[in-house]
Image (tube, coloured by chain):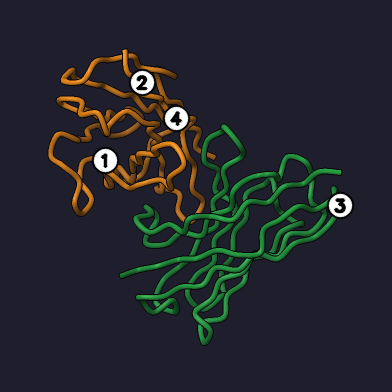
């Protein structure tokens, strides 16, 4: 069974940093491109970042470009999101997800709250 | 960037009724790479439809998707109590850059 489990969320002040992790089990992470998708409280879904299987290709939403970095460690079956220069509007539940453009597999998410 | 506009924002219906949800794209979605998700309160999104009309694994046949180009529709033929939720469309024609619609809430009338 495919499982994705995020961790690393929490309360951080504006301008601060946080690193999210996503642990994969039940499948071989190295075979799949991975995505981060976020959802602000009471709001809709927003794609954040993408990384391909060998980390050679990454893409970011304009709202996080230059501040967030997606990475992966296939040997550890793990995905990461380094978030710097955090803003109030980055407050959201962050999900890792995977498959092929459409996303049948999602983690439960980790809550990031940016507030002073 | 392809912008997806979902309508209506809220749909008030009774169990057993038919629900028709619309998703309109600002430009043509390549190869009908359009997906639909259901999100119940406190849960993660659940993939219902991909490729505009293909049901995902385990999805009941009361859910159907149609459309192409810029206009797509999700139809729930007869609403069950568990179908009252928020529904999102998502395009992956410009994958890996993904975009989601703003959502349609299906609520009990």
Residue labelled with disc 2: B107
Q: Nearer the viewer, residue B2 or B14?
A: B14
Crowding at mark 2 (Cα within 10 Å: few <14, some 14-19, many 20+): some
Q: Which residue is mark 4?
A: B103
User: Element type at marker 4?
Assistant: loop
The residue under label 1 is B52
Quadrant where the C terminus of chain A sits is top right
**CA separation in Å, label 2 and label 3:** 39 Å
Task: Measure the C-alpha gap from mark 4 to mark 1.
Answer: 16 Å
Circle 1/circle 3 CB separation < 8 Å: no
| Label 3 neighbour load within 10 Å: few <14, some 14-19, many 20+ | some
Q: Residue furthest bottom?
A: A75
Instruction: Report which residue position mark 3 lands on.
Output: A15
- The quarter of the picture where residue A28 lies is bottom left
x 37%, y 28%: residue: B23
Counting residues from the N terminus, which is met first, the one under dot 1 or under dot 2?
Answer: 1
Q: Is residue A116 left or right of residue A107?
A: right
- Judge the density around disc 1: few (<14), some (14-19), many (≥20) Cα neighbours within 10 Å: many
- Contact between marks 4 and 1 (CB within 8 A): the answer is no
- Check if mark 2 and mark 3 are on a common chain: no
Which of the chains bears the disc numbered 1? B
Task: Judge if badges 4 and 1 mark residues of a common chain.
Answer: yes
**What chain is colored orange?**
B
Q: Are marks 4 and 3 on the same chain?
A: no
Whether tag 2 and tag 4 are in contact, CB under 8 A, the answer is no
Q: Residue at x 31, y 12 (%)?
A: B109
Residues indicated by labels 1 and 3 sit on the same polypeptide chain = no
Q: Which mark is residue B89?
A: none
SS for dot 1: loop
Same chain for labels 2 and 4? Say yes or no.
yes
């Amino acid at each position: 069974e495919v499982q994705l489990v995020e961790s690393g969320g929490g309360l951080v002040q504006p301008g601060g940093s946080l690193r999210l992790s996503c642990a994969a089990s039940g499948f071989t992470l190295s075979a799949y491109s991975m995505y981060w998708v976020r959802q602000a409280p009471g709001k809709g879904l927003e794609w954040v970042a993408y990384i391909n299987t060998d980390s050679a290709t990454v893409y970011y939403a304009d709202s996080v470009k230059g501040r967030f970095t997606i990475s992966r460690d296939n040997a550890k079956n793990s995905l990461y999101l380094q978030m710097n220069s955090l803003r109030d509007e980055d407050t959201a539940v962050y999900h890792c997800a995977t498959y092929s453009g459409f996303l049948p597999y999602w983690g439960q998410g980790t809550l990031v709250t940016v507030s002073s | 960037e392809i912008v997806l506009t979902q309508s209506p924002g809220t749909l008030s219906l009774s169990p057993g009724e038919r629900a028709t949800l619309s998703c309109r794209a600002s430009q043509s979605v390549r190869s009908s790479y359009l997906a639909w998700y259901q999100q119940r309160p406190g849960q993660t999104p659940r993939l219902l439809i991909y490729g505009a009309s293909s049901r995902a694994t385990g999805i009941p046949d009361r859910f159907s998707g149609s459309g192409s180009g810029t206009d797509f529709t999700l139809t729930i033929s007869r609403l069950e109590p568990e179908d009252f939720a928020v529904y999102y469309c998502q395009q992956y024609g410009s994958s890996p850059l993904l975009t989601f619609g703003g959502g349609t809430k299906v609520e009990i009338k």
